Image (cartoon, rainbow, N blue to C red):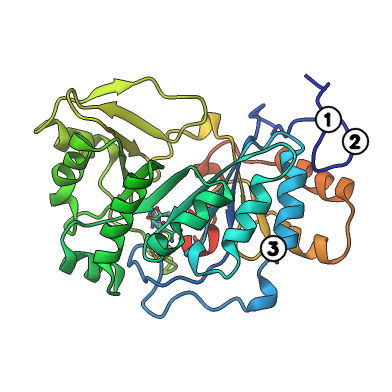
C-alpha cells in the first residue's frame, strides 16, 4: 500500500489522506473563481457575491502545486468548479496542466454551460472527458427568472455539442419547490434518448442570505417521479453522493442528491479548495486551512501536508456536526 511514489511531493512515499473517521480522501473540488455570468437565485444574491479581487484568488501555478501535492497522496479526481469556471481566463491551460500531473488525475468540470460550446474542443484537447452541466428549467422564461440572466439557448446548444462530441454528461437540476418542481418528469424524459445522467439536487441554504431555503426532499422527488416512471435502483458506489436509478428502456440514468438531508456523509471522500484558496473538509463547514497564505509564505510541501492532515484529524463526522452558523454562497465554495 505504501510502495507507490508520490508525484507531487518529490520522492516521499504515498501516504494516503485519511480523516479521523477512517475515510480516505480521493477527490478534490477546486473552485477556480467566485465570479459568475449568472445569478442563480438559490446560489447568490442579485448583486452577486462581493468580488474577492485578483490577489485573493489562487494563481494557476499555485493551484497546480497544491493539486500536485494532493494527487501525490491519493487524490485521483479533480473537479474544476466555481463560480463559473469558464469565466476564468486560462482555465483551459490549468486543466491541461492538471491532466499532465505525473499521477494523471481525472479532470472533471462543472459549468452552467453558457461559455461551453466555444471552449469545448480546447477542453477536450486539454484532457477533459466528462462534464456536469447545471440546468434548472427547460422553459426559457423560467430559466431566466431563476438565473436572472439571458442565454438559455446557448446552454441547450452546449448540451447538443457535448453529446455530439461523445463526452460524458450529467445534468444537475436544483429542485426549487413551487418554481421548477413541475418539471421533474420533463427532465427525467431527457434520459429516454440520450446517455445522460439527470440528477435532482435537494436545494440547500447556500444562497449567501443566511436564510433557510425551501427544499423538496429526495424521497418526495422520487415519489413524484414514480407516479410516471418505474425507477430501478442502482447500487451506490463508495463515495458517490447520488442515489441512482434506471428507467427501463431509457438510455440514461436518474440521480437524486440529498444534499440538504446529508445522507452520504459516512463515506464522503471529498476535499475542497474554495475560491479564496482555503481548504474545506466539509461543504457545510467553515474554511479550515488558509492554503493560499501558506503557499505565499513559501511553506514547503511537508508543512502544507501537515496542515492538511491536521485538518483531517479534526474533520467532522457529517454535515450536521460541521454546519457553520451562516452558510456562504455556493459560488464561493464551489458546490
Ligand atoms: N457555475 C457552475 C454551475 O452552476 O454549474 C459551477 C459552480 S455551482 C456553485 C456548482 C453546483 O452547485 C451547481 O450544480 C449548482 O446548481 C449547485 N448549487 C448552487 N447553489 C446551490 C444550492 N443552494 N443548493 C443546491 N445546489 C446548489
Ligand atoms: Fe453561477 Fe453556478 Fe451559482 Fe448559478 S449555481 S450563480 S451558474 S455559480
Residue 133 in the image: state x and y as whole percent: 37, 52
Q: Earlier in the sequence, mark 3 or mark 2?
A: 2
Q: Quadrant of the N terminus?
A: top right
Mark 1–mark 3 CB contact (< 8 Å)? no
Residue found at x 69% / y 34%: 19
Q: Nearer the viewer, residue 166 or 14?
A: 166
> Element at badge 3?
helix
Q: In percent of the image, x 25 and y 38: which residue is there?
A: 194
Quadrant containing ligand 1 reads bottom left
Where is residue 331 shown, x and y percent of the image? Answer: 48, 63
Of residues 115 and 208, the one drawn nearer to the viewer in this rendering = 115
Q: Are circles 2 and 1 on residues that touch, CB within 8 Å?
A: yes
How many residues crowd around disc 1 within 10 Å: few (fewer than 14), some, or many (20 or more)?
A: some
Q: Is residue 153 at least partly visible in the picture?
A: yes
> Quarter of the image holding residue 270?
top right
Local packing at callout 2 (Cα closer than 10 Å; few below 14, some 14-19, many 20+) is: few
Label 1 sits on residue = 5
First of labels 1, 3 by sequence position: 1
Residue 62 placement: quadrant: bottom right
Are dots 3 and 2 in contact, CB under 8 Å?
no
Q: Is residue 290 left or right of residue 302?
A: left
Q: Quadrant of residue 157?
A: bottom left
Q: CA distance from mark 1 to mark 3?
A: 24 Å
Label 1 lies in ligand 1 vicinity (Cβ under 8 Å): no
Q: Which mark is residue 60?
A: 3
Q: How many residues crowd around disc 3 within 10 Å: few (fewer than 14), some, or many (20 or more)?
A: some
Amino acid at each position: 500500500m505504501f510502495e507507490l511514489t508520490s508525484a507531487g511531493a518529490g520522492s516521499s512515499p504515498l501516504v494516503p489522506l485519511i480523516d479521523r473517521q477512517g475515510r480516505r480522501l480521493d477527490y478534490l473540488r477546486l473552485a477556480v473563481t467566485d465570479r459568475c455570468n449568472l445569478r442563480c437565485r438559490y446560489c447568490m444574491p442579485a448583486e452577486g457575491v462581493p468580488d474577492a479581487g485578483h490577489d485573493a484568488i489562487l494563481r494557476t501555478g499555485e493551484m497546480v502545486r497544491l493539486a500536485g501535492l494532493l494527487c501525490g497522496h491519493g487524490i485521483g479526481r479533480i473537479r474544476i468548479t466555481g463560480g463559473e469556471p469558464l469565466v476564468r481566463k486560462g482555465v483551459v491551460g490549468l486543466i491541461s496542466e492538471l491532466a499532465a500531473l505525473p499521477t494523471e488525475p481525472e479532470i472533471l468540470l462543472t459549468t452552467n454551460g453558457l461559455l461551453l460550446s466555444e471552449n469545448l474542443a480546447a477542453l477536450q484537447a486539454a484532457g477533459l472527458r466528462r462534464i456536469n452541466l447545471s440546468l434548472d428549467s427547460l422553459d426559457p422564461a423560467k430559466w431566466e427568472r431563476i438565473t436572472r440572466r439571458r442565454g438559455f439557448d446557448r446552454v441547450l446548444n452546449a448540451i447538443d455539442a457535448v453529446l455530439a462530441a461523445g463526452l460524458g454528461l450529467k445534468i444537475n437540476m436544483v429542485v426549487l419547490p413551487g418554481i421548477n418542481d413541475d418539471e421533474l418528469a420533463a427532465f427525467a424524459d431527457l434520459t429516454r434518448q440520450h446517455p445522460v445522467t439527470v440528477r435532482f439536487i435537494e436545494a440547500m441554504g447556500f444562497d449567501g442570505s443566511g436564510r433557510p431555503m425551501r427544499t423538496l426532499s429526495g424521497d418526495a422527488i422520487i415519489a413524484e417521479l414514480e407516479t410516471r416512471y418505474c425507477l430501478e435502483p442502482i447500487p451506490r458506489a463508495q463515495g458517490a453522493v447520488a442515489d441512482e436509478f434506471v428507467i427501463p428502456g431509457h438510455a440514461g440514468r436518474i440521480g437524486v442528491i440529498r444534499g440538504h438531508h446529508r445522507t452520504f456523509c459516512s463515506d464522503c471522500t471529498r476535499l475542497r479548495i474554495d475560491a479564496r484558496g482555503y481548504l474545506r473538509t466539509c461543504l457545510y463547514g467553515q474554511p479550515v486551512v488558509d492554503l493560499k497564505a501558506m503557499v505565499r509564505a513559501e511553506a514547503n510541501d511537508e508543512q502544507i501536508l501537515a496542515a492538511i492532515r491536521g485538518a483531517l484529524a479534526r474533520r467532522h463526522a457529517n454535515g450536521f456536526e460541521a454546519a457553520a452558523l451562516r452558510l456562504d454562497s455556493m459560488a464561493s465554495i464551489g458546490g
